[in-house]
Amino acid sequence: MFTVVGFDFSMDRLNHTPLLTSYRFNRKQLGRDAVNILCKKLSSDSDIGFQPPKGKMVYGLSCPCDLAKINFKEEQEYLRTNIQYEKLLLNSNMDQKITSSHTLDELLEVVGEFQYLIRCVNNIFICLYENWYERRADIQSEHMSCRSIMPWLDTSAFNLNKNCLTDIISSYESPAAYYFSPLVFDKCLFGYVILKYDNSDSYDNTFKNWVTSVANGLELLRLKNDINYLLECQSLNKTHDIMTGLKNDIGIKKSFYESVSRADEKNTYFIMIKCCLFQGNFDDVEKKDKISAILDIANALKQFALIIGGTCGRLNDNTFVCILNTGNMTAENIEDLLVSFITQCKTYLLFYGINSFLYSVLTFEENNSYTDLKQKCMQNITNQINNVFELYKTNHYGLMLEIRTDFFMNPQKEFTTKELCMKYSFSPSYLRIVYKKIFGVSLIQDRINGRIYRAKYLLLATDMKTAEVSKECGYDDPKYFLRQFMNCTGMTPKRYRENYCNL
């Protein structure tokens, strides 16, 4: 006679043949003992003796002993319950609804809708690191945003230090069992799911699949705001735009009132920029190229605000706002510097051209609100848009735009009127007339403007010497560059840098 014995009893042993006789550890008593030991250690430094609780044999069909019918019925009921919950998960459309979520609030609302898939749980909390959406974040944020997802409970978000998640437990007077499960996708930790049990139960395979669906949904939502849905999805952060890293409408509004409160003797300027307008010959821009273009202009505005002194944000798809505090600059100076930075965005110009952005610069006056200034800027830009649309009716507008964009994208390049006329089949006089009629500036002067804008940018954004700037802008003779720069700005490159850098 021999007996095959399983070392550790499992409630799903009915799935195997023959039904093994197994040793069942007294896990419930072990849990009670662990809690008692912890409590005693907190109140006393003395050593605490521990005797492991005895378990028992659960008889099956692998030994000559009689089958334990009571345990057999318990196991059958356990398996029936598991099968029931697995069917509930299989027949639910949780994954589809999670996939359709465009915001974090939508996703958590869906997750709360399917809380019933977790057996016998009293409450479910989801705690996410504040920077969970930064896939490549080297350091997780110190704070986590937590909320219950149970629809009938308070689902308001609250913040906790990542090392103090047990504060959730201290908010309840009655004892309960808590289970912390990490939310992980491809080794990236988003946060935790916390289960609160009022009875002796725990997670199962259905919960494991449920958690996997939540983690997959978070990753998909992050990708939506990182690739294809960047231009349509709402922000995942209350104050920042995920795509560009700039502040969003809420964040820039907060910065505006902070700037006004500490402005002292400085002027506060409210600047709105609309880009990706008037595509014209560039109307075949793909979404991925539009994203690249917007990121390019966002980086330029971020650099602009950093150098001049202020902050900037992205309000929506193609609208940006900058808040600047300066002491010795006029609105005209601000506009000129703004154009200097935007015209250096080669990726943006490649897809949209030089005449595809408009802006409005307003000086803050007492009693101006953020909303008032925003509406005024939008109205100013709307008026400009209507005026620019008239230019589209002008003959050869698309060809002239190509020439102008080339001037600003390649300031170091030599252009001759003869070459341009041969390329576009114009006579020299007609080319000059049409160009000035559309853009209000002569062909030659606009070519100079492209070079001087490049020089202004290099003087403020780099530490290049004047001779290096001169060469970068297409001038072989530094003295000739100096003369043209002074004619356009009224000051030397050195004075210009001293005047506007680190205001």
Image (cartoon, rainbow, N blue to C red):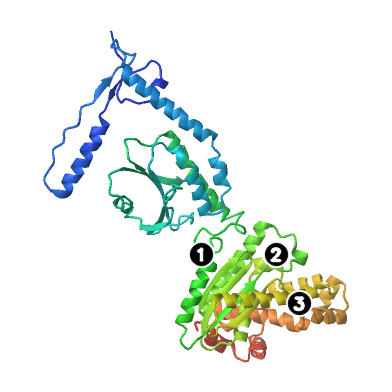
Q: How crowded is mark 1: few (under 14 residues within 10 Å), some or many (20 or more)?
A: many
Residue 351, numbered circle: 2
- Assign a secondary structure to mark 3: helix
For disc 1, the marked residue is 240
- Assign a secondary structure to mark 2: helix
In the image, taking residue 490 as reference, residue 245 lies left or right, namely left
Give how far across and how far down residue 497 sits, in percent. 55, 85
Residue 387, numbered circle: 3
The mark that comes first in sequence, 1 or 3, is 1
Tell me if residue 429 can be seen: yes
Residue at image position (87%, 82%) is: 429
In the image, taking residue 160 as reference, residue 491 lies left or right, namely right
Of residue 326 and residue 139, the one placed in the foreground of this image is 326
Q: Distance from label 1 to label 3 (Cα)?
A: 33 Å
Q: What residue type is labelled 3?
A: Asn
Q: As displayed, is residue 246 above or below residue 167?
A: below
- Assign a secondary structure to mark 1: loop
Q: Which amino acid does label 2 sit on?
A: Phe
Give how far across and how far down residue 409 sits, in percent. 69, 72
Q: What residue type is labelled 1?
A: His
Residue at image position (20%, 44%) is: 38
Tell me if residue 304 can be seen: no
**Could you tell me if the residues under marks 2 and 1 are in contact, i.e. CB atoms within 8 Å?**
no
Residue furthest to the top in view is 1
Residue at image position (64%, 87%) is: 485
Q: Quadrant of the N terminus?
A: top left
**Could you tell me if the residues under marks 1 and 3 are in contact, i.e. CB atoms within 8 Å?**
no
Q: As displayed, is residue 294 above or below residue 459?
A: above
